[in-house]
Image (cartoon, rainbow, N blue to C red):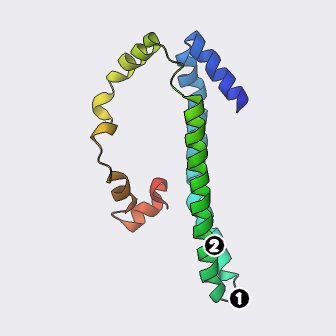
């Protein structure tokens, strides 16, 4: 990861955006797609195997409580850590006005196709958590949880 940060910083300072977008970014996209591809079968098989291996079904409720508790605790820890690092590092401060204007012009042509974050309502994120179709949500990794 440190090598990636150093290489990214070098490309940022030398304005070699095309090298990153043409040669480095596709490998990251492939990696993320492969992770998404394996996530649902891995979670499903792990749950089925774990539940079928239990001899006493009363332990299942304790296991569910422990699972939810650990999930909430690790989520709280991750959010706290992320917000702490962001408040210390202040990402985005490395861009000066000329770089900021360059990227605004570069991506303004794509603006009509993207969703403006400011137009979203606060409850939209929660609404999107509830799938319209159970089978479609099972195949869509962003709705897996």
User: Residue 69's quadrant in the figure?
Assistant: bottom right
Q: Position of residue 43 (x, y in %)?
A: 60, 64
| Disc sitting over residue 55 in the figure | 1
Mark nearest the camera among 1 and 2 is: 2
Q: Nearer the viewer, residue 83 or 29?
A: 83
Q: Which residue is mark 2?
A: 66
- Mark 2 is surrounded, within 10 Å at the Cα level, by few (under 14), some (14 to 19) or many (20 or more) other residues, namely few
Which residue occupies 64% across, 16% down? 10
The span from disc 1 to disc 2 (Cα, nearest Å) is: 18 Å
Residue 1 relative to residue 22: left or right = right
Residue 102 relative to residue 41: left or right = left
Which residue occupies 59% across, 29% down? 89
15 relative to 47, above or below = above
Which residue occupies 47% across, 53% down? 142
64 relative to 76, above or below = below
Q: Position of residue 9 (x, y in %)?
A: 62, 19
Which residue occupies 45% across, 58% down? 143
Instruction: Name the secondary structure under disc 2.
Output: helix
Q: Nearer the viewer, residue 91 or 31?
A: 91
């Amino acid at each position: 990861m440190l090598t990636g940060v150093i290489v990214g910083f070098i490309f940022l300072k030398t304005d070699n955006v095309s090298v990153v977008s043409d040669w480095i970014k596709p490998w990251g996209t492939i990696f993320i797609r492969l992770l998404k591809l394996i996530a649902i079968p891995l979670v499903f098989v792990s749950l089925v195997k774990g539940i079928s291996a239990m001899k006493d079904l009363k332990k299942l409720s304790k296991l569910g409580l422990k699972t939810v508790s650990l999930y909430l605790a690790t989520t709280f820890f991750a959010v706290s850590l992320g917000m702490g690092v962001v408040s210390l590092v202040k990402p985005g401060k490395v861009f000066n006005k000329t770089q900021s204007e360059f990227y605004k012009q570069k991506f303004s042509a794509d603006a009509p196709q993207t969703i403006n974050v400011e137009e979203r309502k606060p409850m939209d994120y929660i609404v999107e958590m509830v799938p319209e179709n159970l089978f479609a949500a099972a195949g869509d990794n962003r709705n897996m949880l």
